[in-house]
Each structure stands twice: as structure tokens, then as C-alpha cells.
Image (cartoon, rainbow, N blue to C red):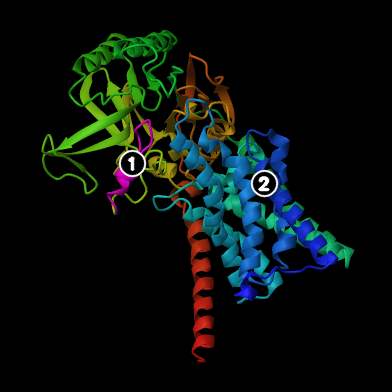
Amino acid sequence: MKFLFAKQEFTPDEKRERRNDRLLLILSGILFGISFVPFPFPFTLLLFVAFVPYFFVVTKKQTLLKVNSASYLTFFVMSLITVFWVGSWQSAADPFLMISGVVLVFFLPCVMLINSTLYFLSRKVFKKDLSLYFFPFFWVTGEYILTLTDLKFPWLTIGHGLAKFTSFIQFADIVGAFGLSFIVLWINIFIYKGIKSFKENAKVGWIYFSVAASIFILIIVYGFVKISSTGNDEKKIKVGIIQPNLDPWNKWELGGLDQILENYFELSQKCVDEGAKIILWPETALPVYLLSGTYQNEVDSIYSFLKKNNVSLLTGMPDFIIYDKDAPRNAKYSEVGKYHYVTYNSILLLQPNQSEIQRYGKMQLVPLGEHTPFVDQLPFLGDLLKWGVGISGWNVGQDTTVFKFVNDKDTIKVGGLVCYESVFPTFPNYFVDRGAQFLTVLTNDSWYGKLSGPYQHKEFANLRAVENRRAVVRCANGGVSCLINKFGVTEVETEMFTRTHSVVDVPMNNEKTFYTKNPLIIPVISSAFSLWIFGINILLWMKKKFKL
């Protein structure tokens, strides 16, 4: 026992080395963090060297504990800088949201240790120098894992940090954000190898630097070619964007439901007057289950507006569906009404001359905020984990929906994403693959004030536009609402926390990119390779354990 708790003594040189290692690890985390929005574009370039200090430290660590201890420090600094905003940190913020934000900053680096663990295990299969070249496989595996299970949170995908580097991200129409992560890491590896080799053999060092520069330049050239080679011959449709700027902590600030609707109608009328054919309202535009049967007067007033102006409405809305039979597996049961029901954070399409309402229930729910993780398997968690605004009990949507509405005898197909869904690199492509001609993101980012989260969320949509070569229209309660073209360039955008409207000409595209049709190639290959490494290590352990 004394041995376990004995204080380890270090020589002055060892203390200096430990201090230098910590500084390098912290430097890596800082370089990664400040390469993300809201830091301006030149800072993006730091991503291409952000992992170099980290590699100098972890490549010399000899045990899994030391590799992961070093990695956790870097990953923690990354998380602290990029996702500290999750706690909201406003006077009106719910304490549970603040606690969730703190937990995330400490827990996310633990999940990211999957990446460093796989790297360490690969060193038991390959030589240490060779193993580093496989690090991108392990990192992308970790990124992909963060898109799965009820704890999904793919915010720190390296490719997202490139969102404002327009010429570089054009390659995402082939490889997606995960592929960009792969490329960035390889450039980091070659730069690290070049620096390490330079003192011993300058010629070898320059070769490594040249390889890194060649990869960088080739991707840039591809980007310039793609941007310059495409004409502007797509059909366009005028879309009205409503940004009502309602306080998410007090959605009844305008008074009753009539006053809230009047606010929407006033802004929507301005869009109609400017020629809009379809109008977008943001996520959960009204704080009620509009179609539950209790609000028929409000439904009638919306249809009256649509018919009067011959315009369609695509709106975020809480949705409530009752099932007499054939209820989904995750349906809830009302003891009072004796029926099964589901509630979705939904998008609804209402059209002036059709009574049928097209629906989509959000499928990618925010862990804890919108959906209690694993509540379907452990129902008691639903009662334990609830926060003040009461939205942690949404059901998970069952399938993607491509909305269809008629404009001048043409059927327009629209993909609708709700908020957080636009962060997932392998999700919006399913809407496009089903025929969506442009994408919309209906969101409410006002929970987080003017912290970095809303700005990051907006910029990540640039990647979704490029990956699928689709225009993306964002409609946000308090901003940022915008039009992003298929090259990931923002053409029109609003200011945060302003009550306003916009009418934008949205290009419609029927092209399907290689990535749209094959979004999982890189993450699946990376995951398969990682599983192989893990399996080989199990066999090596069994061979040693049982002396086979």
C-alpha cells in the first residue's frame, strides 16, 4: 500500500521535461480550439499544425496510461475552448443546462481517448513510426462513434473547423467532413515528421514538408477548379425567412398565442410582398402542440393567411400524435386518456390548397437537452433527468421526410433539418439522396446568447452545403438566419438577436455528389481497421496469457 501512494521523486531534468510536455499538450489544445469559429479565417490554418506539439509528446510515451493522460490534457483544452458555451452561462439559464455544460467539457475528452487508445494499441502491431501514419484512421473512428448511440455529439469533428476555408472544403463533395479530418491529420503528421527529421537530415525533412505542402496545394487546386467551373443555370425559388427573435426562456413574452401569431403574420406578410413562394418559421415556432386538436382556431388563422396570399409554410412546431393501434415502440402511454402517443420536435409543411399536412419528426436529438439518453431501455431515467424548460422528453423521429410543394406547376422538393441535425456529416445526405433540391435548417440557437455555439452551428452548415452541393437556408429564432450556396459561401445573413425577415433566391439542384451517395466509406473503413487493430491486440493478449 505504501508503494501505491508513495510520492514519486523526479530529477530536475525530468521535472523540466514534464513541464515542457504539459506546455506542448496545452498548446495543441489551444491551437485546435482557436481554429474554430468564432475566431476569423486565418486562425483556421492553425488546424494544419495543431496536432504537431501533441505528436511530439505522445510518440515518446511508453504506456497506455501515459499516452491517455497526455491525450486527456490536450482533448480537455480542445473541449474547454470549443464547447464551453453548452452551459449557456446566462442569468436565465437553467441550472441543469449549466451542469450539463460542465459535464460535457470533462466527459467528451474521455470519449476521445478511444482515438489515443487505438493509436497505442497499433504500436503493438506496427513499429512506432509507422503507427503514427494510421492515427487518422483512429481519429475518424472516434469522430464516427460520436455520431452514434444516445450520447452522440459530433461537434468537434476536425473538418468542421475548416468551415470558413472555402477553397479547401470543396473536396468534401467526395470525402465529406470525416475525409477532411483525415487529410488535416496527415498534413500534421508530415509536418511533425519534417520537423523531427530536419536536424538530423535536412533533405529528409524537406521531403516531408514537400509532401504536406503538396497535399495542401492539391486540395486547394481542386477547390478553385470546382468553384470556377460551375455556372449559375439552376432554377431558383424565392424563400421567405422569418426571424422573430423570441426569448427562448420566455416564449410568452408577447402575451398570448394570438399575439405571437400576429408577430409571425406581420413578418410573413413582408416576405409575401417581396415575392416569397414559401415561408420558413423557426424551430418550435409556437410553444404549443398546434395539431393536438386544442388549437383549431389558430390552425384556421394560419390556413387563412396561406390561402389569402397563396403561399406555403414550412415551420418548426412541437407535434403530438395519438395512436389507437400500431403505435411506435417508443410511444408513451397516457393513463388519463388510455391511449399511446408520441411527441416530436417537428417540421410541418402547410399548403394553401391542401388539408394534408406533411410532417417530419426530428431524429437526431440533443442528449439530455431534448432526449434522456437510453430512456427507451431504462424508462426510469426519464423521471430523473429533466430540466426546467421541460423539453427533455421528445420522441426520436422514425424516418426522414422530403417535403413536396407545388410552385408554378413544378413540384419542389425540400429537405428539412431541425437544429442540431445539421451538425451530423452523414445525416443530411439522406434527404438529398431522396430527392431534396435544397436543404433548410430550422433552429433556435438563442439559448446560448452570443457565445460561440450559435456561430459555430451556422458555419458547420457550410460543410453540409458542399458535401451535397445543395443550397442551405437557415431560419433561426434569434439568428443567425442565412442563405448558404452550394460552395459553402454565405450569400445573405442576419444579425443575432434582431427581429427581421429576409427573402432569398434559393437555387435548386438535382445533382448527387459522390459523397451524397457514399457517405460512410471513410468512417466505415477507418472503423474496420480500428476493429482489426483491437482484435489483433486481443489475440496477442490471449497468446501471452495462455502461452499459446
Label whose residue precedes the other's in the sequence (1 or 2): 2
Q: Secondary structure at mark 2?
A: helix
- Image coordinates of residue 95 in percent, x first then y, are 46, 34
Height in image: 272 above or below 164?
above
Q: Secondary structure at mark 1?
A: loop
- At label 1, the amino acid type is Thr
- At label 2, the amino acid type is Phe
Res. 427 image quadrant: top left
Looking at this view, is 27 or 466 the one in front? 27
475 lies left or right of 160 = left
Q: Which quadrant holds the N terminus? A: bottom right
Residue 408 visible to the viewer? no
Looking at this view, is 452 or 385 the one in front? 385
Q: Residue furthest front?
A: 2
Res. 342 image quadrant: top left
Q: Residue at x 29, y 41 (%)?
A: 395
Q: Closer to us: mark 1 or mark 2?
A: 2
| Residue that mark 1 sits on | 400
As for residue 380 lying within the magenta part, the answer is: yes
The CA span between labels 1 and 2 is: 34 Å
- Image coordinates of residue 236 in percent, x first then y, are 46, 24
| Residue that mark 2 sits on | 32
Q: Residue at x 20, y 34 (%)?
A: 321
Write the start and end of the magenta stretch as one range: 378-392
Looking at this view, is 263 or 310 the one in front? 263
- Image coordinates of residue 60 in percent, x first then y, are 73, 68
Looking at this view, is 340 or 17 the one in front? 17
382 lies left or right of 138 = left
User: Mark 2 and mark 1 in contact (Cβ < 8 Å)?
Assistant: no
Local packing at callout 1 (Cα closer than 10 Å; few below 14, some 14-19, many 20+) is some
In the image, which disc is placed on residue 205? none
